[in-house]
Image: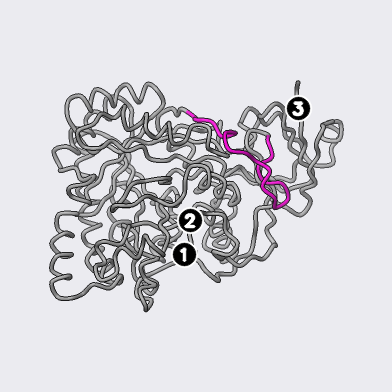
Amino acid sequence: MSSRTVIRGGLVITASDEIHADVLIEDGRIAALAASGTAAAEAWTAERSIDATGKYVIPGGVDAHTHMELPFGGTFASDSFETGTRAAAWGGTTTIVDFAVQSVGHTLREGLDAWNAKADGNCAIDYGFHMIVSDVNEETLKEMDLLVEEGVTSFKQFMAYPGVFYSDDGQILRAMQRSAENGGLIMMHAENGIAIDVLVEQALARGETDPRYHGEVRKALLEAEATHRAIKLAQVAGAPLYVVHVSAQEAVAELARARDEGLNVFGETCPQYLFLSTDNLAEPDFEGAKYVCSTPLRPKEHQAALWRGLRTNDLQVVSTDHCPFCFVGQKELGRGDFSKIPNGLPGVENRMDLLHQAVVDGHISRRRWIEIACATPARMFGLYPKKGTIAPGADADVVIYDPRAQQVMSAETHHMNVDYSAYEGKSVTGRVETVLSRGEFVITEREFTGRAGHGVYTPRSTCQYLN
């Protein structure tokens, strides 16, 4: 049975265009667009019609950096694939790319199988995987080739967390050389973890145990140094590089310099670095623990450089690095020792709204909002034009967005499985009203009408930005 839905009267916004158009959806795909009120549009018939007058019609968000159910610091991220993808949908995101983890001594395949098992049948929206590479050896390198062929086309390495995820420069270089051959993209957590561990040890010895010291030991210069080193290693390998969760203006400068040299180097930042700062880490009574993430929040003056990077395209993507831990019982593991606070913030539900607020505030344009949150992440990770745009043939991942609705962000009203909001009490303009995933209603006029298991695993092609 063919099913048809038509969305009438809205302002369709993509990365390249804004047009008052009606959208015809057929069998889970965008079938056609036509200017509102024209004979072509008026002739469409459909079982379901949505009146989007006065609203935006935008592609579903693509969040290319989430960590559902991630084991970390003796505990697990508090969102499951079921709760996390439901919350993502509430926030207008219709595709996530999560991170499967290779443990040291195990194969990439074992890690990927484990994450497939966690997600399978549980997701409300579509999903893909990156692969965290923790153990670089000959077998791992061969497996990277196989995974690229299967649609897992990006591999994350860590210059931080010695003893957990850490790779040394030799391991990083070998993985980069392999990705230069197989078309994969290396994603880098760029912080000098060896040096940071020294500073952590020294701070604790001085009795500096509060959450704010997490930001003080993870220095911006050590993010910049690692970013510079990752760029040079990628240059030696002839490989592309994507630096995740860029937070420091000095790191942005390293990316800008590399891009000016014509290198295939890309940068991502996250809402927490655009809207929060070390002021939050310094909140009294251990409240600062809620804001412990790595890379850490920076002093407010770094925000201007991040916004500028997004405007000049030295930063191309805003993802969330959604990795929630409850304050009670999880963040509290670090009372008396900031190094034991699980690193991560909730945010998968907040990204599209915060970035719309950035439009309202004049930081970015409407089309740039869609570019950094939908189209570019889809292109970067081989999902475009299936995801990230509204065009004939694309998946009907569509959000009806009310640009004038007012809301106050709060743990009381969010749908993430975590006991606090990083943006508690923040007023924003704009709100998701209805969300379709492959033509099926997931959020219908502010009511969840989706289901676990609707979301399907989505293999990806290689990065679409490589010279």
Question: What amino acid does circle 3 point to?
Answer: Ser
Residue at the image point whose x is 30% and y is 70% from the top: 211
Question: What amino acid does circle 1 point to?
Answer: Ala
Query: What mark, if any, has residue 347 been given in the picture?
Result: 2
Q: Residue 238, relative to residue 244: is it above or below? A: above
Residue linked to disc 1: 422
For the residues labelled 2 and 1, the Cα–Cα distance comes to: 8 Å
Residue at the image point whose x is 51% and y is 47% from the top: 84
Identify which residue, 385 or 257, lies in the foreground: 385
Which element carries disc 2, helix, strand or loop? loop
Residue at the image point whose x is 26% and y is 42% from the top: 157
Q: Residue 300, relative to residue 273: is it above or below? A: below
Which SS does the magenta portion mostly show? loop
- Pick whichever of labels 2 and 3 is earlier in the sequence: 3
Residue linked to disc 3: 3
Q: Is residue 446 magenta?
A: yes
Confirm or deny contact between disc 2 and disc 1 (CB under 8 A): yes
For the residues labelled 2 and 3, the Cα–Cα distance comes to: 34 Å
Question: What amino acid does circle 2 point to?
Answer: Gly
Other residues around mark 3 within 10 Å, as few (<14) / some (14–19) / many (≥20): few
- Pick whichever of labels 1 and 3 is earlier in the sequence: 3
Expressed as whole percent of the image width and height from the top left, the position of residue 220 reads 26, 63
